[in-house]
Image: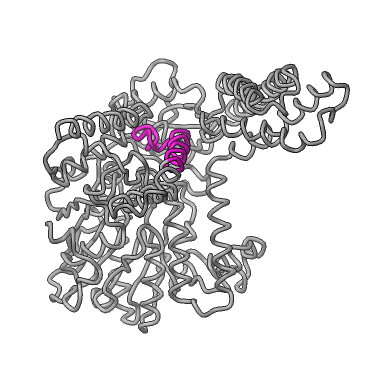
Amino acid sequence: MNAATTQTHEQAGTGFLAEPPSLELSVLIVSHNVRELLAQCLRSVEQALQGIEGEILVVDNASEDDTVETLRPLFPSVYWIPLEVNVGFGRANNIGMSYARGRYILLLNPDTLVHPGTLRAMLDYMEHHPEVGIAGCRVLNRDGSFQETCRRGFPTPWVAFTRLFGLERLFPRSPLFARYSQRFRSEYEVGYAEVISGAFMFCRREVLRELRGFDPEYFLYGEDVDLCYRAHRAGWRIGYVGTVSILHFKGESTRRSTTDAVYHFYNAMHIFVRRYYGGSPLVPVLHAGIKLREFIARLFRYPYLWLLGFADLVGVTAALLVGTRLRFGSFLGLPSYAYPTVFLAVGTVVVMLMVLFGDYLERRVQIARAVMVYGLCLFVVASLTYFFKDYAFSRWVVLATAVGGAAWGVGVRMGIQLLQWLKYEMRPRRVAILGNGTLVQALATTLRQQRDSGLVLVGVIHEGEGKPPLGDGVPVLGSYEELPEVVERCQIQELIIATAQLPPGEVVALAERLARWRVRLSIAHSSDELWAQRFVRELVGQEPAWVEYPLLQPRLRALKRVMDIGVAVIALSFGMPLVFLSSRRRELLHCWWRVLQGRWSLVGIDRRGGGETNVFAKPGLLTLAQLSAERELSPSIVRELNHYYMRHYSLALDVEIVLKYWVRRLRREARA
C-alpha cells in the first residue's frame, strides 16, 4: 500500500490502466473524515450494484476519524486503499484508478446517495452512445432541488466574465449570458453537456487511460472541469442523463476537513485560466475578478467582521467627538495637528482588540466580551498618552470615548441579538423525525434542549408498525405512508431520517417525492448523546471542525498570526546585521522571513509528518515533535503529534513549547 501512497499522475505513465478490464463497473470513492456519510453511500451503492458485475473501491485520504478501522468490518466486499497522507482529491482518485478492474469507472463522492436504478441506466446509456467518454446524471440537493453544478458550460473567458461580474444572474435564462449554469435547458433532458459534476462521473476506462486520470495540480476543486475539457479536446463527448439521479449532501466533506476550501476553490480557477487561456486579453481581468470574488467570499464568511467593525468605528468616533465637545466646548476642539491621528489611533485600537478577542470572527455576538474590550481599550489609549505627551489632551475625553463607545457597542450587539431572537422565534425551522427507537428519543431530547438553535421539533413520523412511545409532549404526526400529507399539513422544513429500515438508496426517491416542499433531508446514525448534540450543531450550521480543532477558531488564528508577525519582525531586525556571518544564520533568517510572510509559524506542525499544510496548520520553526524525543521519530508518530497539537491548541501550549525548547537548548549548551 505504501507504493500506492506515493504514486502520482506523472508516474502512472503508459502503464496507467493498461490491464484489460475483468469487471463491468468499478465504483471509486475518495473519502476524508466522512465516516457516517461514507457508510450510507456504500449501502446505497451496494443496492444499486445488484445485478451488475462490479466492485467498490474506497481510497481513504488520511482520515482522522477511524474511517477504515470502523467501516472495513461492516463492508468486507469493499476494497480499501488507506493513504498515510492527504494527497488531494485528484491524486487520490488516480491512485484508486490504478486498482480498478472495471470496463467503466464511476468516480463518486462519499457524501452522495445513489438511486437503485441509476447505475444500470448509466451503463445502458454508455453502451448505446459510444461517442460519449464521460457522463453524469441529475444531481439533487438534500431538499430535492436540482443542483446546477451537475451540468455546466466550459469556463471560457466570456463565460467566466459573465459569471464573475453578475451578467449570468441578471439574465438567468439567456443562452448568451447563462452558458455556465445552463438554466435555459431542462434538468430532465438526455443529451450532451460540456462539464459534469465531479460528484458523479461515469467514465470509460479507455478515456481515463488516454487522459491519464485527473491533473494532480488541482487539490480539491476544478479537476472535474479540467478532465471534461481535456476529454472534449481529445474528441470525446460529455453526456448528461437527466432521467436518473443521485442525492448529494453538498459541502459536507468540506465542512469536516481542515483544508482551506475557499483558497483551493479560487486557486483552481487561476490554474484553469492560466493553463488554457493564457493568451487571451481577458486573462488579467479574469484573474482580478477571481481575486475579488475570493476576497468577498472570505469577507462574508465572517459577516460580523464588516458589520460590527463599521458600527464600532462609527460609535467610537462619535463618542470621541462628543467627549471633545463636553470638555472643550467644540466637536473639533483639539489642536489641528491631532487630526486625523486621534481618530485613526482610537479606531485602530478598538478594531484590533475586537479582532484579537474574536468578537468579529465568530458567529455569536457577546455583550460581556465587548464591554471587556472597551475597558481594555480605555487602558491602552490612556497608556499611549503617557508615551505621546503631545496627545495627552484630557483623561476625561478618553474616559468619555471608552464609555460612549462601549454604550454604543453594547446597544448594537443587543440589537443584533434581538434580531436573531426574533428570527428564531418568528420563523424557526420546523423539524420532524422519521423513525422509531432510542435514536429518535435521543434526537428529540437534544432538539428540545437547544433553545437558541432556531429549530423547533414539531413531532415524530413513525416508520413501520406501532407508534414510538416518546412521551414528554412530543406528538406523533403520522406514518411513513402519510409523509407527503404530514409535510404539507405541518409545514415541515427539516426531516431527520432516524431509521435503518429505509435503505439509503430509497432516500433519493424520498427527496424527489418531497421536492415541491423543499424539505431538507438529514440522516442520523447514532443514539449516543454526544453524537446527537454534534449532529444538531451541524444541522444549524455550526462548523464541526471548530469543536474538534481549536486552532481553526478565527480568534485564535488571528492572535497567533499577530504574535508571529511581532516575533518575526523583532528577529529579522536584530538578525539582519548577522546575515553575512554564517550560512546557518542566513537560513534561519530565511525561516523568519517565511514566518513574516505567513507561510510558516513560530510554533506549528512538523513537516516530517507529511500531508498537506494550509493556512490552518502551518509548518512551525518549533513543533511538539521536536520536544517529544531526542531520537528520530517515524512519520506516523510525527503525524499523531501534529494532530494532538491541532486538537489541543491554545496560546498556553505555544508558550510551553517555546519555553521547553529554550530550557533544553540552554541545558545542552551548558553540558557542552
Q: Nearer the viewer, residue 477 or 275?
A: 275
Q: Is residue 62 left or right of residue 483?
A: left
Q: Nearer the viewer, residue 301 or 640?
A: 640
Give the residue drawn at x 17%, y 66%: 100
Measuring from the top left, give residue 444's x and y in whole percent. 39, 24
From the image, which quarter does the C terminus lie in?
Answer: top left
Most common secondary structure along the magenta stretch:
helix
Query: Residues in magenta?
Result: 544-570
Residue 120 forms part of the magenta stretch:
no
Rendered view: 668 above or below 18: above
Give the residue drawn at x 37%, y 43%: 601
- Which residue sits furthest bottom? 235
Report the label total.
Answer: 0
Q: Is residue 375 left or right of residue 579?
A: right
Q: Is residue 249 visible?
A: no
Measuring from the top left, give residue 118's x and y in whole percent. 32, 61
Rendered view: 194 above or below 473: below
Q: Is residue 81 left or right of residue 378?
A: left
Measuring from the top left, give residue 587's x and y in whole percent. 31, 53
From the image, which quarter does the N terminus lie in?
Answer: bottom left
Residue 560 forms part of the magenta stretch:
yes
Q: Nearer the viewer, residue 188 or 562?
A: 562
Give the residue drawn at x 33%, y 79%: 129
Measuring from the top left, give residue 575's x and y in whole percent. 39, 45
Q: Is residue 532 visible?
A: yes
User: Picture quarter containing residue 398?
Assistant: top right
